[in-house]
Amino acid sequence: MDVTHLDLDVDRIGICQACLSFVSCSLGDPKEARHWTYEMTPFIWEEGLREPALEAVRRLGNVEALADLEAKGGRSKTARAIVMHLARQQDERARTRWKAMRN
């Protein structure tokens, strides 16, 4: 599933930004990024990702992804993909803000 089609915005959903930063700060090292994604996704799921993710996947109509989320929640492949996507958004926006501050 292409999670970019889910219309989830890291700045508009109530998730723990600090928790997500463990993933976004590790994006330069794929092994570290996977580690932190596996480690933090269950917490991020419980702390606010559950409802927006389920709603977005239902809207998209992806039956497989919805079944994955419903069965495994924050330990699902779909949830990890969503967290990785949100971490990339967070990283990109942080870099943009940093560049703007330096100019």
Image: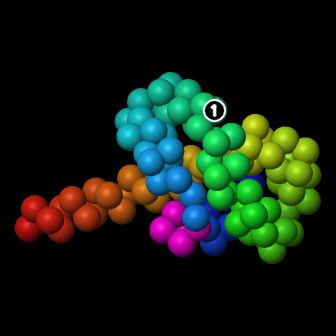
Question: How dense is the environment of label 1, judged by Cα within 10 Å: few (below 14), some, or many (20 and up)?
Answer: many
Task: Specify whether 16 is left or right of 46.
Answer: left
Which residue is at the front of the view, 85 or 22?
22
- Reply yes or no: does residue 41 show up in magenta: no
| Relative image position of residue 17 (x, y in whole percent) | 47, 54
| Relative image position of residue 9 (x, y in whole percent) | 55, 68
Q: Residue at x 28, y 56 (%)?
A: 95
Quarter of the rendering containing residue 51: bottom right
Tell me the amino acid under the disc marked 1. Tyr
Q: Residue at x 83, y 50 (%)?
A: 69
The residues colored magenta run: 9-13
Up/down of 63 relative to 28, above or below? below
Task: Specify whether 63 is left or right of 21.
Answer: right
Up/down of 63 relative to 32, above or below? below
Residue, disc 1: 38
Residue 43 makes an appearance in the image: yes
Q: Secondary structure at mark 1?
A: helix
- Reply yes or no: does residue 10 show up in magenta: yes
